[in-house]
Image (cartoon, rainbow, N blue to C red):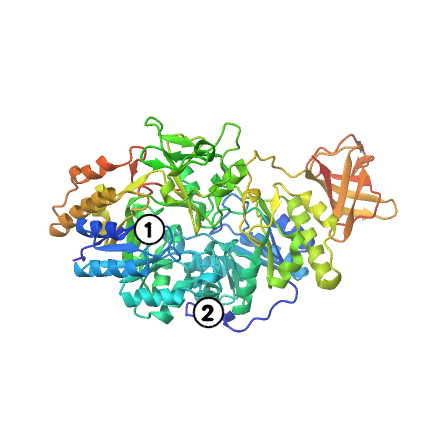
Amino acid sequence: MNTVAKPQYKGKRYRLDKPELLAPAGNLEKLKFAVHYGADAVYIGGQKYGLRSNADNFSFEEMREGVEFAKKYGAKVFVATNIYAHNEDIAGIEEYLRNLHEVGIAAIIVADPAIVDIALRTVPGLEVHLSTQQSTLNWQAVSFWKEEGLPRVVLGRETSLQEIAEIKRHVDIEIEAFIHGAMCSSYSGRCVLSNHFTDRDSNRGGCCQSCRWKYDLFEDAREGEVWVSEEQSAGQPPQRLVPDVTQLPLHQPEDNPFSMGAKDLCMLGSIPDLIEAGIDSFKIEGRMKSIHYVATVVNAYRKAIDAYMADPEHYELKPEWMDELNKAANRPLNTGFFYDTPDHEDHIYEPEEKAAPFDFAGLVLDYDAETKTALIQQRNHFKPGQEVEFFGPDRSPFKQIVGELRDEEGVILDAARHPLQRIRMKVEQPVAYFDMMRKKK
Amino acid sequence: MKSKPELLATAASLTEAAALLDAGADALLIGDDRFGMRLAGHFSLEDTAAAVEMARARGRKVYAGLGGLMPNRLLDELPAYIKAIAEIGVDAAEFGDPAVLAAARREAPGLKLHWNAEMTSTNFATANYWGSKGASRVVLARELNMDEITEMAPKLEVEAQVQVHGMTNIYHSKRKLVESYMAHQGRPITGGSLGKERGLFLIEAERPDEKFPIYEDRNGTHIMSSDDICIMEDLHVLMEAGVHSFKIEGLLKPTAYNVAAVKAYRRAIDAYAVDPAGYAFREEWLDEVRALQDPERELTFGFFYKEQVY
């Protein structure tokens, strides 16, 4: 089986009718939630060659189970093999990719052309998607990858909607774009801050997010005529500085420090624009994010996409979708490069508050319509008297106050304290397996 | 017998180009700001032709840097530029974006291509992949260590180029981060430069002794290393490994400094070529570089002897 095979996907591909909603799944449980809440496809990390070396990545057995689960929903599973490989990584790639194909993975997301090449030559049944780490920004580069045999390119996050539309006009290929989540403020892959600051290789999964650290900005003033800051020059031309000043701070004591940290991407308000630009796959960032985050975000985009596709002419963004999203957001949001180059309002200089306002409190396992009682698996501390909110893929969220709690033996509890404990409580509306119960932090 | 390695230097201007050739550079890297990435300076087509003529007269080479990440709108200007530099007679073009490769195949099939994807040129298989697409040289990532370089050298089907001296880029964004920061402070920049000539730098809260140069240009914001690579002491290891080209990065350095660096490496390369077995590094080769070295920037081995984790 080591013969050189022709790439399979060189021929014409047809534009998907409906854009694919592609969600992150950091582990098997998150995969199940992402799929149940409406993802058409999920991307996961294996134990090698991925860029999230800290995530609890999938074993082949878990992948197989994930693929089986997703199949029931008609959903696909992709694996991110998106490192920039080093010499020592090359030898095992072929076997690893064969295993991915064997367990039913539909596609791999690849940054390094060496891995692209190995995949196309040796595992022709496995689709290869070019990762955003390649920073592909123009239609000729996209066309190059199509010629190589790739059915899909994930564009660099620096492309605008207009540029995406141009790319789609020039090249018949699937275009995937990030539409929600945290973003590298650098060109992805073109940042080695982690390597320099902490000897951790960002392009092999070691990123320590140094772009979100705090910096002070200065100007060298050791020689010659240098520009001085605005308030010092007061409209005057650049001045020669006094000899003992070697550096000029370009910040006042009351200023926030300099930062490269970007706000998180959110395109929920722009679903029609994304679809009209021709983006085939809408990608949500966040393999390290919580179940609550993934379910909530997927749910909101699923509803918006379905509503638009059902009736584009009368489509309106519903405020409750955005309300839902905000319950999971942990940073201020913006629209990245889709409409314009980000400016000062698109970066985070203030201390970050972090942490989404809601916690995942419990998972609905079952519902008894007769007694209006739900069987709930505890996921976080909750107790009678607290306000909780139920939500799910097929329902509008509703709030209620937690009433009496009983364990499975019927013993009354003063609080749900134990992780994964099964608890019965009355609910004010019918709920279903996989519905989630959240509480305010 | 390995061929004598090339000494390549970046030039910011024709004046610097002449000085570097005088100092002993075998090749110069120059380019047009529209297509290049972090070039030391901008060369118009006219200046490029002059540089080629100058180099040619001495039997040296000129490479054009087209390492930028190109948006759609640049694609219209790219073919004419590539055609023009090929006609001028540059010896090779450096590229990172496949769009450049495609345009070069069409417009200048004879033009040699050097693949430089900056920090993402990290293994022999990827280098050979680009070799199979038409590249004759790979510019290795500066984050590789010595073992990785010497181990991959014999596996390469293309020439290898390694940066041996100068600063490196550690972060590149399309965002205008300095301009944004100033606007955020409520003191927007009005007319002043945020470019290379401004001398801006960052200090990270927990690393008060390290200054990271930062500048903006048409490609966005660039943050540079706080130290300068200097591999001189162990250049023989790279020469033994058969690295074809040693690059001196002259970005953000005065010409006098770059000239000193070229002279130093020239002596080492020549000494090794005459007698590889008897070659020994001599401290005094670096005297002039050290005398001109910015005291706030350390000369280091970069990542050559670092173990990185992930």
Q: Position of residue A259 (x, y in %)?
A: 50, 38
Report how far apart the C-alphas of labels 1 and 2 lie in the structure. 35 Å
The residue positioned 76% from the left and 53% from the top of the image is: A394
Hey, what amino acid is under mark 1?
Gly
Q: Is residue B102 visible?
A: yes
Query: Which disc number belongs to residue A322?
Result: none
A118 w.r.t. A350: above or below: below
Residue A288 occupies quadrant: top right
- Residue lying at the far top of the rendered structure: A244
Q: Position of residue B263 (x, y in %)?
A: 18, 46
Q: Is residue A378 left or right of residue B29?
A: right
B128 w.r.t. A48: above or below: below
Pick the front one: A263 or A362: A263
The N terminus of chain B sits in image quarter: bottom left
Pick the front one: B277 or A375: B277
Which of the chains bears the disc numbered 2?
Answer: A
Q: Position of residue B93 (x, y in %)?
A: 32, 61
A84 w.r.t. B309: above or below: below
Q: Is residue B147 left or right of residue A416?
A: left
Residue on which disc 1 sits: B41
The residue positioned 46% from the left and 56% from the top of the image is: A134
Judged from the image, the secondary structure of the residue bearing numbered disc 1 is loop
Residue on which disc 2 sits: A147
- Residue lying at the far bottom of the rendered structure: A11
Hey, what amino acid is under mark 2?
Glu
The residue positioned 36% from the left and 43% from the top of the image is: B197
Judged from the image, the secondary structure of the residue bearing numbered disc 2 is helix
